[in-house]
Image (cartoon, rainbow, N blue to C red):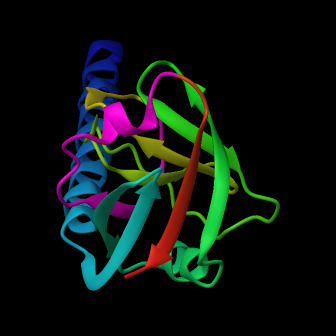
Amino acid sequence: MKAVFTFLAFLICIQLFACNKNNEMASSIHDTSNTGSMKLKITVGSNTFNATVYNNETATAFKTKLPLTIDMKELNGNEKYFDLPNRLPANAINPGTIQTGDLMLYGSNTLVLFYKSFSTSYKYTRLARGGSPSGLAAALGSGNATVKFEVE
């Protein structure tokens, strides 16, 4: 009898884990396709890059702060970040893979601009997806960088 209960508990745990993974994957897929038509212009020095803003509460709150020129700090050889003075609403998910040109919010006030693609286990709230990020890494360089964000 004890073996039957152990087996049933094992099956329930597997089912719960599978449902949670499917919900995370569905959420990530849904969020990825949830971009609006609003474009974001990202300027680094004399270089300009375009991004498509996501259609979510966080991106809407971020847009109210634009135009915004900030000094972003280097981190991990793949991203620049800036701690915003005020919190933004957040709905973080694990995107699985970060793409070059992604603009995301870490926590509720850290703005992150990624200039290299990589896999991640961290959770972020999506703000914008870079359209043609070729040259972004070179423009941002290896140290801190001044970056301007504005609605296009």
* Quarter of the image with the N terminus in it: top left
Total count of labels: 0
131 over 136 or under it: above or below: below
Q: In the displayed image of the protein, which residue is found farthest to the top?
A: 3
Q: Check if residue 137 falls in the magenta segment.
A: yes
Residue at (62% x, 85% y) in the render:
64
Q: Nearer the viewer, residue 131 or 27?
A: 131
Residue 141, image x, y percentages? 44, 28
Q: Which residues are magenta?
A: 122-142
63 over 105 or under it: above or below: below
Residue 71, image x, y percentages? 67, 46
Residue 84, image x, y percentages? 74, 57
Residue 38, image x, y percentages? 32, 85
Residue at (29% x, 60% y) in the render:
129
- Looking at the image, residue 105 sits to the left or right of residue 110; the answer is left
Q: In the displayed image of the protein, which residue is found farthest to the right?
A: 85
4 over 132 or under it: above or below: above
Q: In the displayed image of the protein, which residue is found farthest to the front?
A: 46
Name the quadrant containing residue 144.
Answer: top right
Q: Is residue 105 visible?
A: yes
- Looking at the image, residue 56 sits to the left or right of residue 87; the answer is left
Q: Is residue 125 visible?
A: no
Q: Nearer the viewer, residue 14 or 78?
A: 78
Residue at (28% x, 65% y) in the render:
50
Residue at (44% x, 37% y) in the render:
140
